[in-house]
Image (cartoon, rainbow, N blue to C red):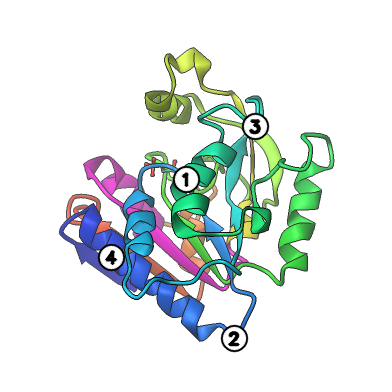
Amino acid sequence: RLFVVTGQEQGGDLAAEEIARALAATESGFVLGVATGSSPESTWRALAARKPPVDLSAVRAFALDEYWDLPADHPESYKEVIHRQITRPLGLNPQLVRVPGDDGKDLRAAQRYEQAIRAAGGIDLQVLGIGRNGHIGFNEPGSSLDSRCRVTQLSEETRKANSRFFATVEDVPAYCITQGIGTITEARRLLLLAYGPEKAQALAAALEGPVTSAVPASALQLHPDLTVVADESAASQLR
Ligand code: F6R
């Protein structure tokens, strides 16, 4: 399903509605996959502002990714960003919110994260953004479509795009830990958010191009329950 919206605020309302509906349709133990970055911000705001309020206190949440070479208490670590933008405003229980590597950044961290997702029963709904180069999570072009959670490198393009959150591009970590494309596409529902003209090419390649590891988000075409919310500029190159 593709929804073309007028802007991020309308997109956020729609995406929040999708999440609230999925939550209501799940008997118990809803597991939400959360993304960071700019794209989901209006969704988190809309979800926090819903009337009557959505009770998320029992929801388990798993983040897509985290910087590897950044202290967990750094303000731009995804652990911190998620706490500020999601856990606190949405009233999630911090103990039920996981970020890859939050239980130790060692050789087995990625494997433990996969196990934790599995032990929670899998992800019911995964929120996603898309990188300008077609990445999802931090699966950069060339990542295997079967990839699992792992420590990997950020592309220079992504480091440049994320340098807006840091003083200089050199301060953006070079390594990350991310759910793999195989991990992400095991979620029961996927909700992809794309706003702005700089996402147009990537979105068209992801949804209408060949399924290829050169465009990691193209793997989403194979998913049976994908909802895409895009504004007019991000959707402008769709046929
Ligand atoms: C964030 C993530 C990334 C972003 C993507 C788009 O957790 O996994 O894939 O979704 O880089 O970022 P924004 O939304 O900032 O344009």
What's under tag 2, amino acid-wise?
Glu
Crowdedness of circle 4 by 10 Å Cα count: few (<14), some, many (20+)?
some
Give me the C-alpha separation between circle 3 and circle 4: 31 Å
Name the front one of labels 3 and 1.
3
Please indicate whether residue 172 sits to the left or right of residue 151 in the image. Answer: left
Label 2: which secondary element: loop
Does any portion of residue 214 appear in the rendered image?
A: no
Q: Is residue 115 left or right of residue 71?
A: right
Indicate if the residue with disc 1 has its beta carbon within 8 Å of ligand 1.
Answer: yes
Q: Quadrant of residue 11?
A: bottom left
Q: Residues within 10 Å of mark 2 (few under 14, many from 20)?
A: few
Residue 228 painted magenta? no
Badge 3 local density, few (<14 within 10 Å), some, or many (20+)? some
Residue position marked by numbered label 3 in the rendering = 72
Q: From which residue to which does the magenta span run?
A: 185-209
Q: Which residue is mark 4?
A: 13
- Image point 77% across, 34% down: which residue? 105
Q: Which residue is mark 1?
A: 36
Q: Residue under label 2, please give it.
A: 27
Pick the front one: 86 or 110: 86
**Residue at image point 57% right, 73% down:** 188
* Residue nearest the observer in this picture, 39 or 41: 41
